[in-house]
């Protein structure tokens, strides 16, 4: 009897296997301490990435066309000048901040980086394994595109192409071009990139938007190609990625999260706020402050129709003076700002509502001043965590504060997670209300009793979806096949993000096992859609959400404040 052959894997199954290989390979290389991107281990990561074909990396699988939107996305998250470095070292906080090296902070990631010399860049990692996977994925993509540039820079017989020689001339003259020369230079560049003139020009303008944190498209393309050429043509100039022994020792030890949480709790006790009901929210550092304080702070400075209109005004780059007025007023009326000193990059605002004048609030908030005076809530607004960092910080925050070895638990009344997420069933700016979180690639799942409901947000002109959310290893690793499976199968997932299951794992442990959180604590999750990775042109690589995110951000904030400022 002949054995039946196994059915071929679906694209979703192949993609899930590729993510698992990436995860295992990266973890192995991290434990080993180094690898070469063009070596055997680096090739394994490349093959897995090519199998996966993440939506955010577009044409990464094309042997000739350089993926420009993906390149913009990656360079916004890596330090300025990394394209010219052949050695990248990932380190923990090891004293570089006290050296003479200038601190380089990427446009879209809060991480300190240091250019050591012309060949080496150090990236400081304090947010755990998620940050390491994020960086390694970006570097792999960058090296793959660099190799395409190298191949496009040479003719079949091995001589430099005319376009590459023209680019070298531009770089030797300072890397900038006049307005009259730009179109001609972009024509040369489009040939090297294997893209149309229009596509190249659009990428050039996108790099111009964040010009302070990158070297511009001409310099980036030349440096990427040159490093790749040097590796192929010269000895002992291989590209390398290293992990310091201190980083390997510290990852997973909650070193930074413990310092961060201890400082917050010490501040609460030092200011006599420990007996107040504490409402924790993971959010941006402006929306709660603006909703509570901006109407009073700017009463004589600007006119506005509603809080959304006021928020839109404050989001404008030219309104820096108005934003400073709001911060100054807030500090005078109960807001304590704790800048990060522990290495988490998470700012914290402690807002004592006993010092906030309820009569100055917008009527949109529907506050109950008598209830606030009676309960005197304390708000803890923590900035967005990154992936696994969410578990570390929330786990440490919910632990009792110890004084002379005696534990004193916080009076946690509610824990709220709000933020951006990719949506699978709607469009940018829509809202998602989770009923559970599911870890991608495992059977781990976290059902939750969400105190937010879909009906809380209906009637405000935004689509609202309720259902399961997928917590992913990284936004860079998602492809349409996996997402379609989660969306259309019995999981019926509505979106994806990086922190939800990590947060819920910590909350659930303290609520049900460690009992350091009151049994009646309210747990709330709400996200707004920053992208739709199922739609071409709607991924994170296509550009920022812009002002489209203002209304959903403030709607979630206002609904949260209503629950804090009123009984029940």
Image (cartoon, rainbow, N blue to C red):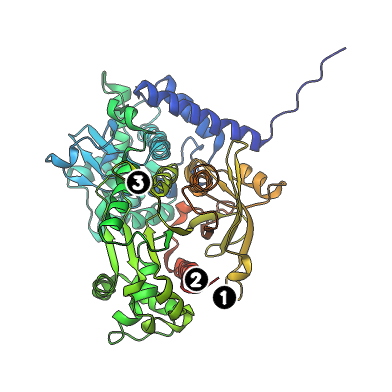
Q: CA distance from mark 3 to mark 2?
A: 32 Å
Q: Residue furthest left?
A: 100
Residue 512: x and y in percent read 55, 45
Check the picture and name the quadrant holding the C terminus. Answer: bottom right
Examine the image and state in which quarter residue 279 appears: bottom left
Q: Callout 2 environment at 10 Å: few (<14), some (14 to 19), or many (20+)?
A: many
Residue depth check, mark 3 versus mark 2: number of the one nearer the observer:
2
Q: Which residue is mark 2?
A: 555
Q: Which residue is mark 1?
A: 460
Location of residue 412 with respect to 249 vertically, above or below: below
Q: Which mark is residue 75?
A: 3
Q: Nearer the viewer, residue 395 or 440?
A: 395
Taking the image as drawn, is residue 317 in sight?
A: yes
Mark 2 and mark 1 in contact? Answer it, CB < 8 Å: yes
Q: How would you rate the neighbour count of disc 3 (Cα within 10 Å): few for under 14, some for 14-19, many for 20 or more?
A: many
Above or below, 120 against 192 in this view is above
Q: Which of disc 1 and disc 3 is earlier in sequence? A: 3
Separation of residues labelled 2 and 1 (CA atoms): 8 Å
Give the secondary structure at mark 1.
Answer: loop
Identify the residue shown where x is 40% and y is 56%.
202
Q: Nearer the viewer, residue 515 or 535?
A: 515
Q: Secondary structure at mark 2?
A: helix
Q: Residue at x 18, y 37 (%)?
A: 95
Query: In 3D space, how far apart are the residues under numbered discs 3 and 1 (Cα atoms)?
Result: 36 Å
Q: Secondary structure at mark 3?
A: helix
Answer left or right for 467 relative to 382.
right
Q: Earlier in the sequence, mark 2 or mark 1?
A: 1
């Amino acid at each position: 009897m002949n054995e039946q052959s196994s059915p071929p894997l679906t694209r979703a199954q192949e993609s899930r296997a590729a993510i698992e290989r990436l995860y295992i390979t990266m973890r192995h290389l991290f434990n080993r301490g180094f690898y070469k991107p063009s070596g055997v281990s680096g090739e394994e990561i490349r093959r897995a990435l090519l199998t996966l074909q993440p939506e955010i990396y577009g044409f990464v699988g094309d042997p000739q066309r350089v993926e420009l939107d993906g390149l913009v996305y990656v360079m916004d998250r890596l330090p300025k000048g990394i394209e010219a470095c052949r050695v990248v070292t990932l380190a923990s906080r090891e004293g570089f901040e006290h050296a003479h090296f200038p601190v380089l902070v990427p446009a879209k990631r809060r991480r300190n980086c240091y250019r050591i010399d012309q060949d080496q860049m150090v990236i400081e990692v304090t947010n755990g394994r998620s940050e390491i996977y994020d960086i390694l994925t970006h570097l792999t993509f960058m090296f793959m595109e660099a190799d395409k540039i190298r191949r496009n820079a040479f003719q079949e017989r091995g001589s430099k192409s005319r376009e590459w020689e023209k680019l070298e001339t531009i770089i030797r003259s300072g890397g900038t071009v006049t307005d009259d020369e730009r179109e001609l230079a972009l024509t040369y560049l489009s040939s090297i990139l294997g893209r149309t003139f229009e596509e190249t020009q659009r990428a050039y303008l996108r790099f111009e938007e964040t010009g302070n944190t990158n070297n511009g498209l001409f310099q980036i393309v030349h440096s990427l190609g040159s490093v790749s050429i040097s590796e192929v043509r010269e000895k002992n100039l291989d590209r390398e990625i290293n992990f310091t022994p201190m980083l390997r020792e510290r990852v997973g030890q909650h070193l930074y999260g413990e310092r961060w949480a201890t400082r917050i709790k010490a501040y609460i006790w030092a200011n006599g706020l420990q007996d107040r009901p504490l409402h924790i929210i993971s959010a941006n550092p402006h929306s709660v402050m603006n909703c509570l304080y901006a109407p009073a702070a700017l009463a004589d400075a600007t006119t506005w129709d509603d809080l959304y209109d006021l928020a839109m005004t404050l989001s404008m780059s030219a309104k820096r003076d108005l934003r400073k007025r709001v911060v100054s007023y807030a500090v005078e009326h109960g807001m304590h700002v704790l800048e990060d000193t522990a290495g988490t990059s998470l700012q914290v605002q402690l807002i004592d509502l006993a010092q906030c004048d309820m009569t100055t609030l917008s009527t949109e908030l529907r506050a109950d001043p008598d209830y606030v005076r009676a309960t005197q809530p304390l708000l803890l607004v923590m900035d967005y965590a990154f992936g696994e960092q969410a578990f570390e910080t929330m786990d440490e925050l919910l632990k009792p504060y110890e004084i002379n070895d005696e534990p004193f638990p916080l009076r946690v009344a509610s824990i709220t997670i709000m933020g951006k997420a990719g949506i699978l069933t709607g469009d940018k700016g829509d809202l998602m209300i989770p009923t559970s979180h599911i870890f991608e690639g495992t059977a781990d799942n976290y059902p939750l009793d969400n105190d937010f409901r879909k009906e809380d947000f209906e009637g405000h002109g935004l689509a609202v979806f309720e259902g399961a959310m997928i917590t992913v290893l990284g936004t860079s690793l998602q492809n349409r096949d996996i997402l379609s499976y989660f969306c259309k199968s019995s999981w019926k997932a509505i979106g994806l993000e990086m922190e939800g299951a990590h947060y819920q794992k910590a909350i659930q442990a303290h609520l049900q096992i460690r009992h350091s959180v009151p049994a009646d604590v309210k747990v709330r999750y709400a996200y707004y859609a920053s992208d739709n990775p199922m739609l071409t042109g709607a991924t994170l690589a296509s550009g920022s959400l812009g002002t489209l995110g203002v209304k959903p951000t403030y709607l979630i904030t206002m609904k949260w404040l209503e629950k804090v400022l009123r009984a029940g």
